[in-house]
């Protein structure tokens, strides 16, 4: 893709939601699993009943035509040349609120997202070799990490996330970046057909604790990897065993409803062995800081600060240990 090609010539997402995934099967033609998934994603996007879809499509149609470009090897991937009307673009992009993963720079407008996802990427990047790899990113959000993966050498990134506004945000990114091989499909892992799928790497970041059966989730991932593939797993863990080997919140954890189980690292490693993975390397353990996850103009809802105990930031408002996240590199 030429950095000065017109986005309108490359597949303007504003008016072609019906062709959002047309190019995807051609990027891995021998993979029938991917052909099936791309078709499922397109049908769901075409028939999605979400009440805000009309408004989101209107926002996409209002995006200015600019010269496509992609500079993704930076904290805020820079997609598209600058627009002559940045305030108008800012207002249009705000219509796709909330922006959670980033930061991103679209058409010269910097989007200060809830998460400083670049901090997480800094923890992950030293442990990766993505050169020429095909990657599946489960729970990918708006595809932020996909841009970083392409910059790290990946040949194809397939992201899945059932939250439709994140797919709209990805379409906005694609409007500025052109036909880069980074896709976000409106699917959860439960919508994916069983493997084999043959991915070189699968990323599961911030997903495991949302699954009722964590071992089943890990087994699903293993089936989507090639025989010697790598799982990049990032998830909440307990810093100690004061709550036992697994914390099962009574109702909410850090104000989140759908957190089913948070393990110690030892129990997490046991789950991985039970799922059939051979080796696991603990690469990082980091307590999430309010500077890394916070409310901004681009994500105006409550964030981590409101989920922590007002008198003791080492605890959530429910009295559980504050969020700590572990990063593991896991081999089949």
Image (tube, rainbow, N blue to C red):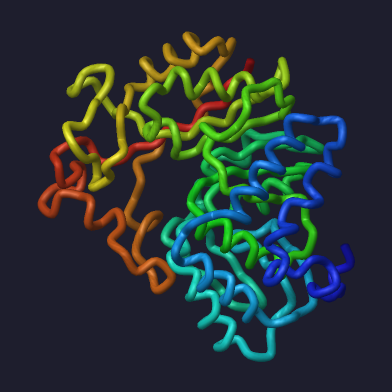
Residue situated in front as seen by the camera: 73 or 96? 96
Give the answer, above or below, for where 223 lies relative to 171.
above
Which residue is pictured at 57% across the width and 31% down the height?
Answer: 232
Total marks shown come to 0
Q: Quadrant of residue 323?
A: top left
Q: Position of residue 247 (x, y in %)?
A: 24, 25
Q: Position of residue 258 (x, y in %)?
A: 31, 38
Residue situated in front as seen by the camera: 75 or 185? 185
Q: Position of residue 77 (x, y in %)?
A: 65, 62
Residue 122 shows in the view:
no
In this rendering, position of residue 161 left or right of residue 181: left
Which residue is pictured at 57% across the width and 26% down the height?
Answer: 329
Residue situated in front as seen by the camera: 317 or 301? 301
Q: Position of residue 149 (x, y in %)?
A: 68, 46
Which residue is pictured at 51% across the width and 21% down the height?
Answer: 218
Give the answer, above or below, for where 164 lies relative to 205.
below
Q: Which image quarter is the C terminus in?
A: top right
Residue 275 shows in the view:
yes
The extreme right residue here reads 2
Give the answer, above or below, for where 158 lies relative to 231.
below
Q: Quadrant of residue 92?
A: bottom right
Which residue is pictured at 48% across the width and 75% down the height?
Answer: 94
Residue situated in front as seen by the camera: 150 or 9? 9
Q: Which image quarter is the N terminus in?
A: bottom right
Q: Quadrant of residue 86?
A: bottom right
In this rendering, position of residue 170 left or right of residue 208: right
């Amino acid at each position: 893709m030429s950095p000065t090609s017109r986005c309108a010539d490359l597949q303007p997402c504003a008016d072609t939601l019906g062709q959002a995934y047309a190019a995807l099967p051609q990027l891995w033609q021998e993979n029938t699993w991917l052909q099936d998934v791309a078709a499922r994603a397109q049908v769901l996007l075409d028939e999605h009943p979400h009440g805000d879809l009309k408004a989101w499509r209107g926002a996409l149609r209002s995006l200015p035509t600019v010269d496509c470009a992609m500079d993704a090897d930076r904290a805020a991937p820079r997609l598209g040349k600058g627009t002559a009307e940045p305030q108008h673009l800012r207002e249009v992009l705000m219509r796709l609120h909330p922006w959670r993963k980033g930061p991103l720079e679209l058409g010269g407008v910097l989007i200060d997202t809830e998460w400083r996802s670049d901090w997480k990427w800094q923890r992950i990047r030293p442990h990766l070799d993505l050169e020429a790899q095909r990657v599946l990113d489960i729970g990918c959000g708006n595809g932020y990490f996909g841009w970083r993966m392409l910059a790290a050498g990946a040949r194809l990134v397939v992201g899945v996330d059932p939250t439709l506004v994140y797919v709209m945000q990805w379409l906005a990114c694609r409007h500025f970046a052109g036909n880069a091989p980074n896709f976000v499909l409106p699917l959860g892992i439960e919508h994916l057909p069983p493997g084999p799928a043959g991915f070189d790497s699968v990323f599961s970041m911030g997903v495991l604790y949302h699954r009722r059966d964590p071992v089943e989730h890990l087994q699903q991932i293993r089936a989507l990897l090639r025989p010697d593939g790598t799982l990049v797993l990032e998830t909440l863990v307990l810093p100690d065993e004061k709550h036992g080997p697994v914390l099962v919140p009574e109702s909410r954890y850090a104000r989140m409803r759908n957190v089913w189980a948070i393990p110690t690292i030892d129990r997490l490693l046991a789950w991985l062995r039970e799922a059939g993975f051979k080796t696991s390397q603990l690469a990082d353990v980091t307590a999430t800081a309010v500077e890394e996850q916070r409310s901004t103009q681009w994500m105006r809802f409550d964030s981590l600060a409101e989920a922590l105990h007002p008198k003791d930031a080492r605890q959530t408002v429910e009295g559980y240990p504050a969020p700590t996240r572990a990063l593991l590199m896991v081999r089949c």
